[in-house]
């Protein structure tokens, strides 16, 4: 069924369910299930069939292995291509895929050795070799590729791409410009795909469980089973993804039986879908977070007392209950809840309006008035701004909400760093040290979103990134997180659940701590009962 027919079907159904219900006074309750628990465990698999999926998308989608940006690109590309490592959904740690192991050659972690899995075959019949890994890395660094996002990941590793060494047909030696103890994290990034020498993105070839069949950006694309796949599955003959950004059309496509799964289910319809016979909701507690960002290079947030006051204004339970309809859990102003070094002894910050007023008065910001820039580009952002604005009023702070579309937000307000004193955005979960290099502190360079500069914190992070000993690295990371907890630039009020809807005919679903939709797009593990 085409995308046009799906949209038309939603209208004919008379809107099985209307998405966008008003905020409830109480909201739903988030799942308490373990991320390791599978809601479809113990059911008998049936091979074959066409797995039909609907998710938000756009006409900017790509099948280029090194231009992957949003979840839509990841969904399209995860079946085609694979990375050396991937993030394990249960441990939230890197695990081998195309590489059997990635180990430091020296005690400092300045040279790493990648050992490849033998007998992995590309869709064109060629066997994976060290040459393909070297080609893939060099393609990313080629300016003509324009692989800005994945290049940012590899820049964090400080890879010396001009000195990559083929040790043998299945071994690559990767020298770094400076030691990096978390090199395996970069090798697990969903955007770092290995492609064959001479790769042409117009004729996509990878090692994944599915082969390219058809691709129409923003519409419907089809992928067929790779029966020579080295790993588990695939169990279905093919899968097709239809991009439906309209929440109502996407939900109705599921409930009408036109698709078998939908990604990023709107919170307002979770109870409806979960209460409909033949359908269920995959509710996963994960580390997805929507920080409220405070620009530290200018008033009023250049004064740490104002930042502390704003954190004390936040009623986190109310924000989760109203902005997320209860599908989440409260946070404590730092991200990465599954970080091994997370300092679990930090006191949970609570709302304290009187203390917030006192800090604002001491900073000369009593009766503060300012804009709060937000965007509906992700569910819960505008709602969180509305709730926090009401909370701030209790402390005498007047926030004027300025909501803009996603394109305007990224183009004008936060292309690489903040252009306004106060805004909010969204992030997928990452380990803490990875996140620091992407968005906070001097290590992030021009992407130091909040212009937050704390030399002691920078020193701890730099040392942690270069520390091979895991226990010591976790200790340094915990110290850095504690500093951010005390004087950092974000209000992190909660971690929101990942919500997907599916037909109960689908088997093989697992909860993913990293919060990526639809089984982390590992469609090879899915089948029908």
Image (spheres, rainbow, N blue to C red):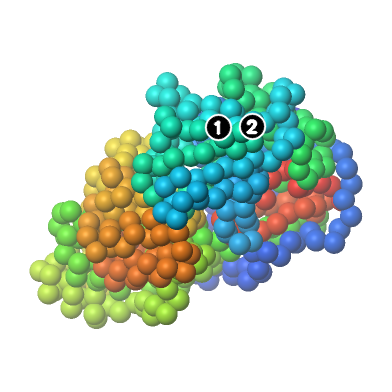
Q: In this view, does 37 lie to the left or right of 467?
A: right
Number of other residues with Cα within 10 Å of mark 2, as a class: few under 14, some 14 to 19, many 20 or more? some
Q: What distance separates the C-alpha of mark 1 from that of mark 2?
A: 7 Å
Q: Position of residue 92 (x, y in %)?
A: 57, 59
The reply to whether residue 431 is visible in this rendering is yes
Q: In this view, does 99 lie to the left or right of 222?
A: left
Placement of 383 over or under 241, stated as above or below: below
Placement of 36 over or under 131, stated as above or below: below
- Identified at 54% across, 50% down, the residue is 103
Number of other residues with Cα within 10 Å of mark 1, as a class: few under 14, some 14 to 19, many 20 or more? some
Quadrant of the image occupied by residue 283: bottom right
Placement of 305 over or under 503, stated as above or below: below
The residue where tag 1 is placed is 166
The residue where tag 2 is placed is 169
- Identified at 42% across, 64% down, the residue is 473
Q: Where is residue 41 in the image (x, y as percent from the top left)?
A: 80, 61
Task: Label 2, secondary structure: give it.
Answer: loop
Quadrant holding the N terminus? top right
Frontmost residue, 230 versus 4: 230
Extreme-left residue of the structure: 364
- Identified at 79% across, 59% down, the residue is 40
Task: Label 1, secondary structure: give it.
Answer: strand
């Amino acid at each position: 069924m085409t995308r046009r027919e799906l949209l038309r079907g939603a209208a004919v159904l008379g809107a099985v369910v209307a998405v966008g219900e008003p905020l409830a006074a109480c909201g739903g309750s988030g799942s308490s299930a373990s991320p390791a628990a599978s809601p479809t465990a113990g059911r008998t698999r049936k091979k074959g069939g066409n797995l039909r999926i609907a998710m938000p998308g756009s006409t900017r989608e790509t099948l280029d292995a090194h231009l992957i940006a949003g979840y839509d690109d990841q969904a399209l590309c995860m079946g085609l291509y694979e990375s050396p490592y991937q993030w394990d959904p249960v441990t939230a740690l890197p695990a081998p895929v195309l590489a059997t192991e990635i180990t430091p050659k020296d005690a400092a972690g300045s040279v790493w050795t990648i050992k490849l899995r033998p007998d992995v075959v590309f869709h064109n019949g060629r066997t994976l070799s060290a040459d393909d890994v070297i080609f893939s890395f060099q393609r990313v660094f080629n300016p003509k590729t324009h692989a800005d996002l994945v290049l940012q990941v590899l820049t964090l590793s400080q890879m010396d791409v001009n000195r990559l060494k083929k040790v043998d047909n299945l071994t690559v030696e990767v020298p770094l410009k400076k030691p990096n103890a978390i090199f395996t994290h970069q090798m697990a990034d969903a955007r770092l795909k290995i492609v064959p020498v001479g790769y042409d993105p117009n004729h996509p070839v990878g090692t994944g469980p599915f082969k390219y069949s058809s691709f129409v950006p923003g519409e419907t694309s089809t992928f067929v089973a790779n029966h020579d796949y080295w790993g588990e599955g695939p169990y279905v003959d093919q899968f097709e993804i239809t991009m439906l950004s309209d929440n109502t059309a996407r939900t109705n496509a599921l409930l009408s039986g036109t698709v078998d799964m939908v990604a990023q289910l709107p919170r307002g319809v979770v109870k409806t879908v979960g209460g409909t016979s033949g359908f269920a909701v995959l509710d996963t507690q994960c580390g997805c977070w929507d920080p409220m960002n405070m620009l530290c290079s200018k008033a009023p947030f250049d004064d740490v007392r104002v930042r502390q006051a704003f954190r004390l204004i936040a009623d986190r339970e109310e924000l989760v209950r109203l902005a997320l309809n209860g599908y989440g859990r409260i946070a404590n102003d730092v991200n990465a809840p599954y970080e091994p070094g997370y300092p679990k002894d930090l006191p949970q910050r609570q709302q304290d309006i009187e203390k917030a007023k006192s800090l604002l008065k001491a900073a000369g910001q009593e009766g503060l008035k300012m804009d709060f820039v937000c965007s509906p580009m992700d569910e819960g952002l505008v709602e969180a701004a509305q709730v926090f604005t009401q909370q701030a009023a209790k402390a005498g702070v007047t926030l004027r909400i300025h909501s803009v579309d996603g394109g305007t937000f990224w183009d004008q307000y936060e292309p690489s760093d903040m252009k306004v004193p106060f805004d909010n955005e969204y992030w997928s979960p990452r380990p803490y040290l990875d996140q620091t290099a992407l968005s906070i502190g001097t290590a992030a360079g021009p992407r130091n979103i909040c212009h937050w500069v704390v030399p002691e914190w920078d020193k701890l992070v730099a040392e942690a990134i270069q520390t091979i000993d895991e226990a010591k690295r976790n200790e340094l990371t915990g110290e850095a997180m504690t500093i951010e907890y005390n004087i950092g630039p974000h209000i992190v009020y909660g971690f929101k659940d990942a919500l997907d809807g599916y037909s109960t005919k689908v088997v093989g679903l697992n909860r993913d701590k990293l919060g990526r939709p639809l089984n982390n797009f590992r469609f090879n593990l899915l089948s029908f009962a």
